Image (spheres, rainbow, N blue to C red):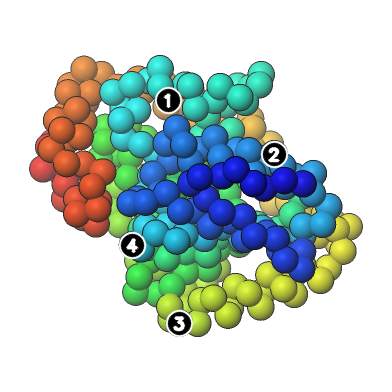
Amino acid sequence: MSYDGFTASTVKISSGIAEVTLDHPPLNLLDAVLVPELKRFVRTVADDTDVQVVVFQSAVPDFFAAHVDAGYMVDATGFAQLGADDGPTDLNPVQHLTHAIRSLPQVTIAKLRGRLRGGGNEIAMACDLRYAAAGTTWLSQIESRMGIIPGGGGTQLLPPLVGRARALEVILTGDLIDAVTAEQWGWINRAVPDDELDDLVSGIATRIAGRSGNQIAAAKAAVSAALGNVDLAQQYQAESAALGLVYPAPPAVVDRMARALDGGLQTPEQERDLEHSLDAYA
């Protein structure tokens, strides 16, 4: 298998573990560069029987993956082009990516530092396991502050983790949630001190990589059965129908987001307090 030629991420394979490091500064924005690369990686690793565990992590300070490029709020055609290589599908391009991650035969782990909002959080939730650095990691579904709702799987992946009421709170407030609270809610597996995170994830990944492919497949299938063997693709279609009520966005929202982008949205300074930045344009 070849994992060469990536420009917005790096892939390291060792002892059955694939470490995927998002390295697309300044924000690891899910855009026309990073999204196709992640899709290419997922397509490749799905057939790599030498890999038992996939770890997603970030090399960009302060951001795991900021969110989907907000430019697509004013460019629905450009958003659709993110799915140019997806083949026949009823899923939108980000749903396609998160569904592909969730469907991998390997165990997937999100190692979280920094901010992950919107699509960045949807990628983490698509993973089987999530571990975060306490005090330096914050999660949200920011879309309501942009005038839409989550559309990359967030409305379907979040409720099984945190419950209906908390999912509605997260989705409709667009508030940023710290890692310790996220752990208490079941959003992530564990929040640990930053200097313990690497060893924790390495140990878990190494132990799981020592299991056979059949063990991993059996465990994932059995646990899915306990949850009702949910057809995630069908759920995503319901999300798409709901998203269609608010995206493509109405002119007032497009105008507000265009002003926000012109005013410096998607710069590290504004992204560190994105909630306040977006509210300023409301």
Query: Is residue 81 visible to the viewer in this orientation of the structure?
Result: yes
Label 3 Cα crowd, 10 Å radius (few <14 / some 14-19 / many 20+): few
Q: Is residue 25 left or right of residue 111?
A: left
- Looking at the image, is mark 2 or mark 3 earlier in the sequence? 2
| Position in image of residue 194 (x %, y %) | 43, 78
Separation of marks 1 and 4 at Cα, in angstroms: 25 Å
Q: Which residue is mark 1?
A: 79
Label 4, label 2: how far apart the Cα atoms are:
28 Å
User: Label 3 belongs to which residue?
Assistant: 195
Closer to the chain start, of discs 1 and 4, is: 4
- Pointer 2 local density, CA inside 10 Å: few below 14, some 14–19, many at least 20: some
Q: Amino acid at mark 3?
A: Asp
Image position, residue 233 (x, y; %): 64, 32
Local packing at callout 1 (Cα closer than 10 Å; few below 14, some 14-19, many 20+) is many
Q: Is residue 141 above or below residue 87?
A: below
Q: Are marks 2 and 3 in contact (CB under 8 Å)?
A: no
CA–CA distance between discs 1 and 3? 37 Å
Specify whether 26 is left or right of 22: left
- In the rendered structure, find residue 43 and report the number of the disc placed on it: 2
Residue, disc 4: 62
First of labels 4, 3 by sequence position: 4
Q: N-terminal of the two: label 2 or label 1?
A: 2
Q: CA distance from mark 2 to mark 1?
A: 20 Å
Residue 146 falls in which quadrant of the image?
Answer: top left
